[in-house]
Amino acid sequence: MNRLSNNMAGKRRFYNPLAILVPKDDLPDVNKLEKQIPPVLVQALKKHKYHLVGKHSAVKRCKWLYEALVNNRACYKQKFYGIRSHQCIQMTPSLFYCTQQCLFCWRAQNTDLKIAWDEMNLPSWDPPESVIRGSLEAQQRILSGYKDHPKVDWQKLREASTPKHVAISLTGEPTLYEHIGELIHEFHKRKFTTFLVSNGTLPARLSTLSEEPTQLYISLCAPNKQVFQQVCRPQAHGSWENLGETLGLLGSFRCPTVIRMTLVRGLNMDNVDEYSRLVERAQPTYIEAKAYMHIGFSNLRLSFERMPEHKEIHNFAVRLAEQTGYKVLDEAPESRVVLLSRLQKPVRFSS
Ligand code: SF4
Ligand code: SF4
């Protein structure tokens, strides 16, 4: 079915997301990972608090879930777009697989831990229903850890047990998952809003998406091919050109689109004029300029000094605004992110 005619965004109803479950016997065994995935990698990911789901998916507690439940703080996406941090699941259907090896990425990459696997040797994919069921169960396990927390907000914890938003973004390239459109559809059937974050190297998958997400993010972390090769380290020929094709596709989406720039001091924060030409081509609803964060496995590749201050991000965003005609709409210094748009204010999704 055509992507644009199949969007369900306006037709969602609320119900308990745990009410529609596939039989337990249909779930893939977590222990039956593809043979090529080294057990040491799985152990390292578990140590980093990844909850593995089936053969290739995972859920991880976002720090903002904790902040929302314990310290009454919210992530910048709640501030900008109204999604609620404590009712958000952060997950990926492509834990071990990506078309890039970005220097700034927090995921474990092939050879990071002196462990080798082929990130482009794709598995037999689990069905979307079992990915969702496993993700919901993982989120409940994460939440159960808060029941004894002395500072937890009980009202929020109760609300959190019915998640309403999913960030399909944790690690890996989610459009490698061949059922990504159905996964989005199944989440929408369960009354979730969905933010899909892609590196844009698979335009064919995006152009034939059977259902649009609530909001689509495309990462643009280089102003030109040379920086792209150095910083994003594509694993296939033609990736820069494919990303360009994806930028040209953004106008065909009905959902709001975002160009996300992860900015690393001294690596990809120059050439604002080249970035502005790419923005001109894509015409996204928003641009999010965001600082690289020195966390996760990126610590093995970049030094702490590579992390820009918020004022550097702000200055970059102001220069980009001047060149593109976009306006600085909002910012969140605690996350070192600035939001630009041509809209007067962002579209909000909360109920
Ligand atoms: S939207 Fe992103 S930052 Fe906010 S709670 Fe969800 S995963 Fe965390
Ligand atoms: S595209 Fe995303 S998941 Fe893949 S290496 Fe880059 S930041 Fe990480």
Image (spheres, helix red, strand yellow):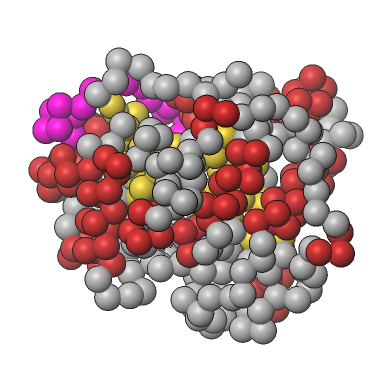
Against 296, is 36 above or below? below
- Tell me, yes or no, whether the highlighted magenta stretch contains residue 327: yes
* Quarter of the rendering containing residue 208: bottom left
Q: Which residue is drawn at 53% across and 55% down?
A: 180
- Tell me, yes or no, whether the highlighted magenta stretch contains residue 285: no
Against 32, is 189 above or below? above
Give the image location of residue 285, x and y in percent: 31, 31
Classify residue 155 as left or right of residue 103.
Answer: right
Against 280, is 41 above or below? below
Classify residue 203 as left or right of residue 152.
Answer: left
Give the image location of residue 57, x and y in percent: 64, 61
Classify residue 167 as left or right of residue 273.
Answer: right
Q: Which residue is drawn at 58% across and 63% down?
A: 95
* Quarter of the rendering containing residue 35: bottom right
* Quarter of the rendering containing residue 323: top left
Depth check, front residue: 217 or 187:
187
Q: Which residue is drawn at 27% across and 40% down?
A: 251
Depth check, front residue: 305 or 188:
188
Q: Is residue 110 visible?
A: no
Q: Is residue 236 visible?
A: yes
Depth check, front residue: 336 or 165:
165
Q: Ligand 2, what quadrant?
A: bottom left
Give the image location of residue 303, x and y in percent: 40, 58
The mark total stands at 0
**In the picture, which quadrant includes the C terminus?**
top right
Q: Which residue is drawn at 63% across and 46% down?
A: 186
Give the image location of residue 11, x and y in percent: 57, 29
Classify residue 297 as left or right of residue 133.
Answer: left
Q: Report the magenta residues as a range.
A: 318-336
Against 243, is 188 above or below? above
